[in-house]
């Protein structure tokens, strides 16, 4: 049997297909396609190669890992994406990839490390616990059966929202009128994210970075990004979903939220109804979403019929 080889990821069509195949086997609800992963890398790492390491045995990818600078936490917070085959050599390969990632991170003087693990993979939870990580947050993965969804019980709430003077529109419709809406949406997005439970709190993004992300399909899609405006025309809420190319049956929910003064008026429900209607009109079977268990949005999703499938644990390690 060939030895386990740990090396820096070298971009190629076959290397991206290896990544996507392993990832999708482990995360079937969040599938990836090699050529799209390559395109995302080009956008996210335009200033240099992705800080990613892989473990191969012969021609078989066993584990992979990388780090990124997230939109939450204090400076020095880094997010790790680590995944491996769930067989006997998975932990060994992941350990060596983790060591390579940590060596790459060392010159950056990391303060806090974050990694995400399903509660259905106890060996992976144990892997991080053995390295000083602890489960500090829980996020529920849920999905909605779109064709089976009944909007009837929520219709009266949506009508009340309209009668109160709120208006819903899509980002695609706003874009037809120019770019003026983008700064107001950026301000709304930041205000909502500041209220979302996340370790270390939300780290605001520069307006230029936000505008760049608006053009990245796996982050924003204008026709499935909905905004609520109050009677004065100010943005007060949003709900967005994104599809993944070559994934025909599912669409993925992103941020849904409403500014505090406009909560408990049915605005979030109306926005969710718009997202669900868009999914149905475009033939999707499922809407997938993640909600931190303390986030009231989880209760709304469950009331609308989202079914919890597993819990994602946020593993955190604070370095000395």
Image (cartoon, grey):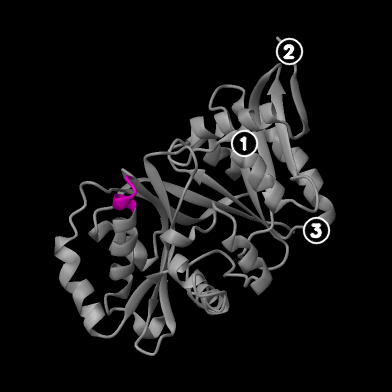
Which type of secondary structure does the marked residue at label 1 adopt?
Answer: helix
Please check the rendered image and state whether residue 160 is part of the magenta-colored stretch, yes or no. Answer: no
Q: Which sits earlier in the primary sequence, circle 3 or circle 1?
A: 1
Q: CA distance from mark 2 to mark 3?
A: 35 Å
Mark carried by residue 2:
2
**Disc 2 vs disc 1: which is toward the camera?**
1
Which segment did they paint magenta?
279-283
Label 2 crowd bin: few (<14), some (14–19), many (20+), radius 10 Å: few
Q: Is residue 161 left or right of residue 4?
A: left
Q: Which corner quadrant of the image does residue 73 belong to? A: bottom right
202 lies above or below 39: below
Q: Is residue 80 left or right of residue 155?
A: right
Would you name the residue on which mark 1 appears?
35
Would you name the residue on which mark 3 appears?
109
Please check the rendered image and state whether residue 282 is part of the magenta-colored stretch, yes or no. Answer: yes
Magenta stretch: helix, strand or loop mostly:
helix
Return the residue nearer the eye: 219 or 246. 246
Image coordinates for residue 15, horizontal then vertical, percent: 69, 29
């Amino acid at each position: 049997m060939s030895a386990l080889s740990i090396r820096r990821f070298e971009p190629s069509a076959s290397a991206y297909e290896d990544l996507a195949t392993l990832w999708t086997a482990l995360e079937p609800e969040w599938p990836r396609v090699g050529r799209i992963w390559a395109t995302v890398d080009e956008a996210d790492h335009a200033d240099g190669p992705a800080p990613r390491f892989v473990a191969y045995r012969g021609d078989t990818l066993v584990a992979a890992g990388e780090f990124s600078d997230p939109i939450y936490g204090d400076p020095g917070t880094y997010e790790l994406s680590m995944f491996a085959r769930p067989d006997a050599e998975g932990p060994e390969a992941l350990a060596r990839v983790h060591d390579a990632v940590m060596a790459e991170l060392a010159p950056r003087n990391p303060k806090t490390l974050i990694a995400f693990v399903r509660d259905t993979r106890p060996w992976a939870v144990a892997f991080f616990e053995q390295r000083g990580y602890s489960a500090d947050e829980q996020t529920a993965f849920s999905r909605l059966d779109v064709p089976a969804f009944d909007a009837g019980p929520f219709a009266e709430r949506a009508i009340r929202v309209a009668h109160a003077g709120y208006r819903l529109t899509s980002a695609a419709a706003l874009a037809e009128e120019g770019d003026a809406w983008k700064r107001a949406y950026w301000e709304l997005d930041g205000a909502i994210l500041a209220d979302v439970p996340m370790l270390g709190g939300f780290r605001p993004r520069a307006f230029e970075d936000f505008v760049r992300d608006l053009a990245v399909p796996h982050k924003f899609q204008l026709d499935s990004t909905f905004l609520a405006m109050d009677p004065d025309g100010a943005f007060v809420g949003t709900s967005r979903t994104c599809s993944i190319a070559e994934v025909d049956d599912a669409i993925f929910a992103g941020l849904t939220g409403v500014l505090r003064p406009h909560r408990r008026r049915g605005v979030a429900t109306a926005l969710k109804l718009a997202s669900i209607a868009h999914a149905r009109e475009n033939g999707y079977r499922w809407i997938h979403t993640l909600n931190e268990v303390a986030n009231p949005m989880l209760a709304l999703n469950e009331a609308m019929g989202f079914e919890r499938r597993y819990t994602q644990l946020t593993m955190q390690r604070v370095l000395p």
